[in-house]
Amino acid sequence: MKVYTKTGDNGTTALFGGTRVPKHHIRIESYGTVDELNSYIGLIRDQEMNQLYKNVLIEIQDRLFTVGAILATDPEKAILKNGKERLNIPKISVADIELLENEIDRMEESLPQMTHFVLPGGHTTVSYCHIARCVCRRAERLSVSLNETEAVDESVLKYLNRLSDYLFVLARKLTFDLNAEEVKWIPRKDE
């Protein structure tokens, strides 16, 4: 199979199910941003860190492929003529969301309570987490916007929301583990 098909040379692409849409369609922006997020998570996973974090990140990457597949499916063609779902893969489950919540809770047990906003940075790996968190929030915003015109599986929206929280807490936990400085944002006072 060739990587290039030339079918998108006119500025359109096919959704799962065959529907062709412009490459700037919000559905394409949504799953394209999920793909970007997945790449950043791969970059985080490539850093030196506890193997447990790497294992969770691999699970997240797997789930993001599922999120992308769901977003890439034309809702009008999601059910085949025989009544079966076009996507024959496990969907995002309550357990997937609970994994993120449990990991957040576990990491927060060893972190000092937040009293201020935190400036991104302090260590390269921490910065990568903050970039991924921002990309995740963008994917969530695009998916929510898409949901206003075409239904998006509610579990996808919940997963992206919880994942951005996970990435924020992971950034804080890595700051702690790496003995990096967590810089609090303290607004300037008017002089």
Image (spheres, helix red, strand yellow):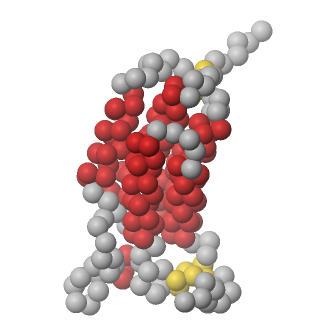
Residue 7, can we see it? yes
Residue 149, can we see it? no
Q: Residue at x 54, y 70 (%)?
A: 28
Q: Is residue 18 above or below residue 119?
A: below
* Residue furthest out toward the top: 191
Q: Position of residue 43 (x, y in %)?
A: 59, 51
Describe residue 75's horizontal placement relative to residue 5 as left or right.
Answer: left
* Residue furthest out toward the right: 191
Q: Is residue 149 above or below residue 18?
A: above
Q: Residue at x 29, y 86 (%)?
A: 80
Q: Position of residue 178 (x, y in %)?
A: 56, 28
Q: Residue at x 47, y 85 (%)?
A: 19
Describe residue 178's horizontal placement relative to residue 121 as left or right.
Answer: left
Q: Nearer the viewer, residue 27 or 36?
A: 36
Q: Within the image, what quadrant is residue 12 found in?
A: bottom right
Q: Nearer the viewer, residue 141 or 182?
A: 182
Describe residue 121's horizontal placement relative to residue 87 as left or right.
Answer: right
Q: Position of residue 27 (x, y in %)?
A: 51, 69
Q: Position of residue 9 (x, y in %)?
A: 68, 86
Describe residue 156's horizontal placement relative to residue 168 as left or right.
Answer: left
